[in-house]
Amino acid sequence: MTRKNYQAFRLPASWVVMSLFMLTITYSSCYYDVEEELYDPKCDSLDVTYMGTVRGIVFSYCQNCHNTGVESGGVILDTYEGIRAVVDDGRLLSAVKRDGVASPMPPPPSTRISDCAIEQIEVWIRRGAPKN
Ligand code: HEC
């Protein structure tokens, strides 16, 4: 191999190394963005309780239409037992996530409740939806 040939080989090789390096950076920064979106650091999904978290979410988003005086769709959400009933049949999570099974809640034109609120409700349900 002459010296000239060797140099001709070196240039592309260094470009390959450089491209791989850039790709790694690009890929890892994209991955980081996705992580950040999934696990919102400002969302406290560890310290989640019925009294401290879930009741407040349901109160602000749902209780106008779902209380012991106004039982829209037969759903009561101002008592633990009422909330628990639609937790257990899966309709509460389905409604707030708007997954197409239960009616989307709160109903349009209202939009989805915040991702953080959904995550907190989901965590509470996964822990067995305790009255804590
Ligand atoms: C503006 C009034 C209104 C608000 C606010 C509202 N709902 Fe409803 N909801 C209704 C009505 C009306 C129905 C019955 C008709 C239907 O199912 O679409 C209903 C039905 C439901 C059902 C039964 C759905 C089914 O497919 O069987 C669930 C569960 C429910 N609501 C949960 C909630 C939750 C949780 C919230 C708060 C995040 C909420 N709703 C907010 C009016 C409301």
Image: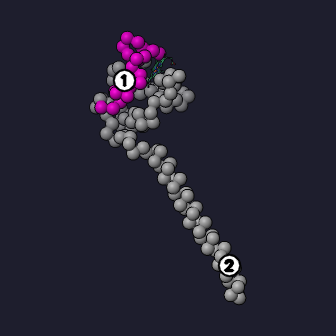
Q: Position of residue 23 (x, y in %)?
A: 58, 61
**In the image shown, does 132 or 11 lie closer to the viewer?**
11
- Dot 1 amino acid type: Phe
> Circle 1 sits in a helix, a strand or a loop, which is it?
helix
Which quarter of the rendered picture does the C terminus lie within? top left
Q: Are marks 1 and 2 in contact (CB under 8 Å)?
A: no
> What segment is highlighted magenta in the picture?
52-74
Q: Nearer the viewer, residue 85 or 73?
A: 73
Majority secondary structure in the magenta region: helix
Nearer to us in this view, 18 or 130 = 18
Q: Is residue 33 above or below residue 54?
A: below
Residue 81 makes an appearance in the image: no
Establish if 39 lies above or below 3. Answer: above
> Residue 59 sits in which quadrant?
top left
The residue shown at (56%, 28%) is 100
Determine the residue positioned at 33% across, 36% down.
48
Residue beneath disc 1: 59
* Residue 112, horizontal then vertical, whole percent: 49, 29
Residue 29: mark: none
Residue pictured at 61% horizontal, 66% vertical:
19
73 in the magenta segment: yes
Amino acid type at image mark 2? Phe
Asked if 42 appears above or below 100 in the picture, the reply is below
The residue indicated by pointer 2 is 9
